[in-house]
Image (tube, helix red, strand yellow):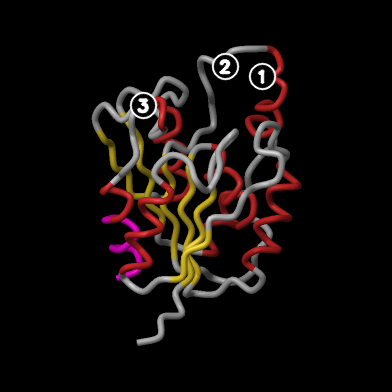
């Protein structure tokens, strides 16, 4: 059975396709016949909005209703900002530890890198035109993402389904997370 559904997983700041839980979910989705791509985003140590959006655009080429996204951390923002540029409806999105405010940045350099991502406005109405299937997954103890603010923005602005996990930190290797069954469950639910 040929499957035309394409899933793009966008890693976070300082991330890579081989890190976190990405290899695990890629394998799980491929076992189910989906085409999964985890692009190595440009300059992940110093992510720049325009570069990341352009790169997603290049990798995806022609989005359609069989195109899905999973984003982690800054990857969620990159997907939102990419969707602002798209006039085509897509299948849906799962955001993991997406944010609009950050806490515990460790240096002025990090503050400087994060600032455009936090200050450049996002056109939520444009994003809503691309899909009404959005799920946002958060942890109740994420050291970087203040739960209330990010959850409320995604719920109010994008009408996202909100899922809160316990004790998953920032859903990263530092939090000891290499598998996130909830992400698999939610993307499969969106795909239907």
Dot placed on the residue nearer the N-terminal end, 2 or 1: 2
Q: Nearer the viewer, mark 3 or mark 2?
A: 3
Q: Nearer the viewer, mark 3 or mark 1?
A: 3
Position above or below: 141 against 91: above
State the image coordinates of residue 58 (x, y, percent, origin top left): 70, 63
Residue in view at x 41 percent, y 52 percent: 94
Name the residue nearer the viewer: 176 or 76. 176
Dot placed on the residue nearer the N-terminal end, 3 or 2: 2
Q: Quadrant of residue 166?
A: top left
Residue denoted by label 2: 105
CA separation, marks 3 and 1? 22 Å
Most common SS among magenta residues: helix
Residue in view at x 75 percent, y 47 percent: 51
Tell me the quadrant of the picture where the C terminus can be found.
bottom left
State the image coordinates of residue 137 (x, y, percent, origin top left): 35, 42
Q: In the rendered structure, does residue 187 fall within the stretch colored magenta?
A: yes
Q: In the rendered structure, does residue 186 fall within the stretch colored magenta?
A: yes
Mark 1 falls on what kind of element? helix
Residue denoted by label 1: 111
State the image coordinates of residue 158 (x, y, percent, origin top left): 46, 50
Do the residues under discs 3 and 2 have CB atoms within 8 angstroms?
no
Mark 3 falls on what kind of element? helix
CA separation, marks 2 and 1? 6 Å
Q: Which residues are magenta?
A: 185-192
Name the residue nearer the viewer: 73 or 173. 173
Badge 2 density bin: few <14, some 14–19, many ≥20, Cα 10 Å: few
Mark 2 falls on what kind of element? loop
Do the residues under discs 2 and 1 have CB atoms within 8 angstroms?
yes
157 left or right of 163? right
State the mark number for residue 9.
none
Name the residue nearer the viewer: 129 or 91. 91
Residue denoted by label 3: 175
């Amino acid at each position: 059975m040929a499957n035309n559904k394409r899933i793009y997983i966008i890693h976070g700041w300082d991330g890579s396709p081989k890190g976190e839980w990405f290899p695990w979910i890629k394998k799980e989705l491929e076992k189910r016949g989906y085409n999964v791509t985890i692009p190595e985003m440009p300059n992940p140590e110093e992510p720049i909005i325009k570069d990341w959006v352009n790169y997603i655009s290049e990798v995806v080429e022609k989005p359609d209703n069989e195109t899905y996204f999973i984003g982690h951390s800054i990857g969620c923002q990159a997907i939102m900002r990419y969707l602002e540029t798209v006039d085509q409806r897509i299948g849906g999105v799962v955001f993991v530890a997406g944010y609009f405010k950050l806490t515990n940045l460790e240096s002025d350099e990090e503050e400087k890198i994060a600032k455009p991502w936090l200050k450049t406005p996002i056109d939520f109405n444009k994003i809503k035109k691309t899909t009404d299937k959005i799920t946002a997954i958060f942890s109740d103890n994420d050291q970087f993402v203040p739960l209330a603010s990010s959850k409320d923005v995604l719920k109010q602005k994008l009408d996202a389904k909100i899922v809160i996990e316990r004790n998953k930190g920032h859903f990263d290797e530092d939090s000891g997370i290499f598998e996130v069954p909830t992400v698999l469950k939610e993307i499969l639910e969106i795909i239907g």
